Amino acid sequence: MSPETGAEAGGRESFEVIPAVDVQDGAVVQLVQGERGTETTYGDPVEAARRWIDAGAQTLHLVDLDGAFEGDRANAGAIDAVIDAVDVPTQLGGGIRTADDAVDLLERGVDRVILGTAAVEDPSIVAEIGADHPDSVVVSLDAKGGEVVVEGWTEGAGISPVEAAERYEDLGAAAILFTNVDVEGQLEGVATDPVRELVAATDVPVIASGGVATLEDVRALADAGATAVVVGSALYEGNFTLEEAQNAAETVE
């Protein structure tokens, strides 16, 4: 199932821990603050995807990093291989620049497309895709120093995450993927205040990403109101298991 809002006993919304499968040059990598040259490599994307599904993943977060930096889906073959190999929903970002690109991927079998640069440059693309494919667009709001950044986190967009989230809620975004680039990939913990601000500003589900190092970080993001968290380095490095992370989130009242 895709990461969505769902009521549990006692009225608390469900919370999902989503493993990241970020692909660069055909291999799974994790970057520090999105900087090329900082990557640690973790092998074949299909093997990684199967590993997380075996561990209990209900959704996979796929990113074509070369596409994010260069605007061209250089790892399309590797991503297609993952989609063919798995039987859980996927959300895919990186290099999706047009509505046609997004629709092609949705018809190919991706459950949700993640739009960052394309949505910032042309917000109407969110409504355009959603018209025929409801609940299919996740808008990626990546922030450095409180400003949304695009083009692989290299250019400022001149807008705050809260302002952007309000815009995309009106356009029908299914979810906001919020990545705090200031803490991304460093395994030094999360910053919850920006997440709380987004959750308070919009009714669109917020998926958090960036900086998760411990089970306490997972609990903190759940407590901040996020409906899901994308986790990369901490899972690959064995800081905790996927099951432990999901159980930790479920302890939040």
Image (cartoon, helix red, strand yellow):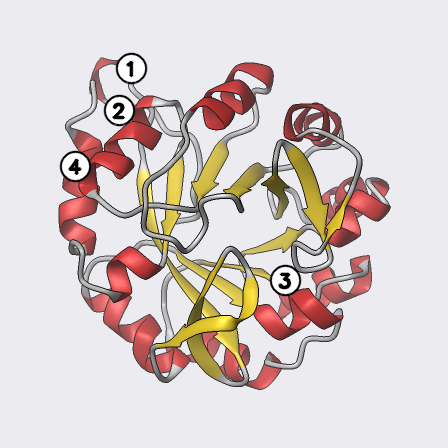
Can you give x and y, in whole percent of width and height, for residue 66 in the image?
Answer: 63, 74
Q: x and y percent of residue 44 in the render?
A: 37, 84
Q: Which label sits in the foreground, 4 or 1?
A: 4
Relative to 193, is 251 on the left or the right? left
Return the residue at label 2. Answer: 8
Compared to 144, does 35 lie above or below? below
Q: Report the Cα–Cα distance between label 3 and label 2.
A: 29 Å
Q: Amino acid at mark 2?
A: Glu
**CB atoms at circles 1 and 2 under 8 Å apart?**
yes
Q: Which residue is mark 4?
A: 248
**Residue at 23% over, 65% down:** 237
Of label 3 and label 2, which has the lower sequence position? 2
| Quarter residue 209 falls in | top left
Going 53% across and 19% down the picture, which residue do you hit? 197
The residue that disc 3 covers is 106
x and y percent of residue 20 in the render?
A: 40, 60
- Inspect this view and state whether residue 109 appears: no
Chain-order first, disc 4 or disc 1: 1
Badge 4 element: helix
